[in-house]
Amino acid sequence: MNKNLGWKLALSIGFLLVCLYGIFGMPQSWTGRGLVAALQEHIHLGLDLKGGTHLILQVQVNDAVNVETDNVVERLKDSFSKRKIHYQDIEKPDPVNKPDQIVIKGVGPDSSSDMRSIVSDTLPEYDLTSGADNNWTLAMKAQDLRDLKDRAVAQAIETIRNRVDKLGVSEPVIQEHGLGQYQILVQLPGVDDRGRVKQIMQSTALLEIRQSLSGNQSYPDEQSALAASNGVLPPNAVLLHGQSMPGAGGETRDAVYIISRSSAVAGHDLREARVERSSSTNLPEVSFFLTAEGGRRFSAFTSAHVGDYLAVVLDNKVMEVAVIKSEIGDNGVIEGQFTDEQAKDLALILNSGALPAGIRYLQELTVGASLGTDSIRAGVEAAVIGMLAVLIFMLVYYRGAGINADLALILNLIILLGFMGYFGATLTLPGIAGVILTVGMGVDSNVLIFERIREELRNGKTPPSAVEQGFGHAWITIVDTHVTTIVSAAILFMFGTGPVKGFATTLTFGLLANLFTAVFVSRMIFDWVLGRHQRGEALSIG
């Protein structure tokens, strides 16, 4: 009976020590306060327990579509000009509701073949259909449109995550919100200053580099800018606000620029930006690097606009204006009278503000730290009371075998917390509910085994045989119940939001731990007890 007991005991003790290390690590102090600090360092608390900020953001995916189709309009105009294709106009009739549609007006029958050739060669993601009066409609294919919007959301999540990571927020949740289309869920535990959070998030907007049609000239208001253009803006121009170039004293003021409507490159074309020193003036400058496709388009644009000015536009606001001194390929330099701090800020904007679309706040909630503390206290009290009630019940009802069940339940809880510590799982208030439910599942497993052993004893089996048969017959039922519950927890994890995922995570870890404790550890304890029994001695199981 005891031939395998040694290695089973060694395995159980080793596993227990590994799990304790996952919970506490190596505490700096073995006092109660030191152990609590080590526990908090390894078991991360969710927003509902630690307090913090909960945001739901709506990604304005049509911004990304408009940027794409605006660039397509300009590319078509350039291609038509080179191929000498006569047309009346190229426009987007409804950029708000149908930003993916472009109408090409007045293309003669003699030029339609060349036009179709250009579209098929350079714009394979678009469908071209003919209409009345020599008009043609160019619309993005449904799958390509969905892919573009999905990429906008994915890039927005990554950009926001990069910015939040710089704040040092532990265990932030930044993910697609499953309850709304093109929405992002942001949870920042420990950050309960809503104003600070808004300040962090507000500059994560659409970044573009466009041509400044007014050069480095700015105007004090929109009326002055219109007057400089004889009251009528060029067709491909808009008025954008920004800051004027610094004066002699370094002061700036609100100013208006005349900027091209289309962008040379947009946020998704930027790969990296960093601060460097000019070799000639030793002043700070910002070097930027583009993707291969972005570099190709930017090279063609800058070679045709040497001596003109570029504007760095963030969220439709002009951040900086710089001159194009030569053709720029996949990298370039933005020069200006920058201070070190201004250059660093501009590089930060380029790196972390390169969202492909704007964002809008749908929901803002702040959970106070005091509420989180109350939740922890109530949850821990519920868990402790429930655990004690179960332990006492098992002792009273199953007598000596109840000690076996209680040891397995305590080990089950240690293993569960150890899993969470190693995997970096976040404990939420629903997660505490998952811990309590795990205790109930552990009791259920022990009841199944113990009642089966009782039945075998009533049928006249010896204690060793009854234990053997009890575990053998109950095993299939335990595995069946645990597997079905784990599948349900997996579905909750895949489709649920943060707190629901916390519940699913703790429940899954707890069930896996329970399979080990209820079957392996409990059986080991029974084997040890039976090994110390005299022949014919009854088994204390109620």
Image (cartoon, helix red, strand yellow):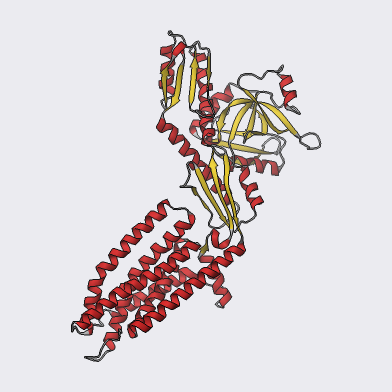
Locate residue 389: give its quadrant: bottom left
Residue 160: x and y in percent read: 55, 46
Q: Residue 401 location, x and y as percent? A: 33, 82
Quadrant of the drawing holding the C terminus: bottom left
Name which quarter of the figure residue 274 lies in: top right
Most extreme residue toward the right is 249
Q: Is residue 25 above or below residue 93?
A: below
Is residue 527 or residue 16 the one in the foreground?
527
Q: How many marks?
A: 0
Q: Position of residue 337 (x, y in %)?
A: 72, 36
Look at the picture and state if 450 lies above or below 328: below
Q: Residue furthest left?
A: 460
Residue 365 shows up from this direction: yes
Q: Residue at x 33, y 69 (%)?
A: 515
Quadrant in which residue 229 is drawn: top right
Query: Considering only vertical position in the picture, is 405 above or below 254?
Result: below
Identify which residue, 56 or 249, lies in the foreground.
Answer: 56
Q: Position of residue 291 (x, y in %)?
A: 50, 35
Q: Is residue 395 left or right of residue 271?
A: left
Whether residue 7 is visible to the viewer of this picture, yes or no, is: no
Quadrant location, the N terminus:
bottom left
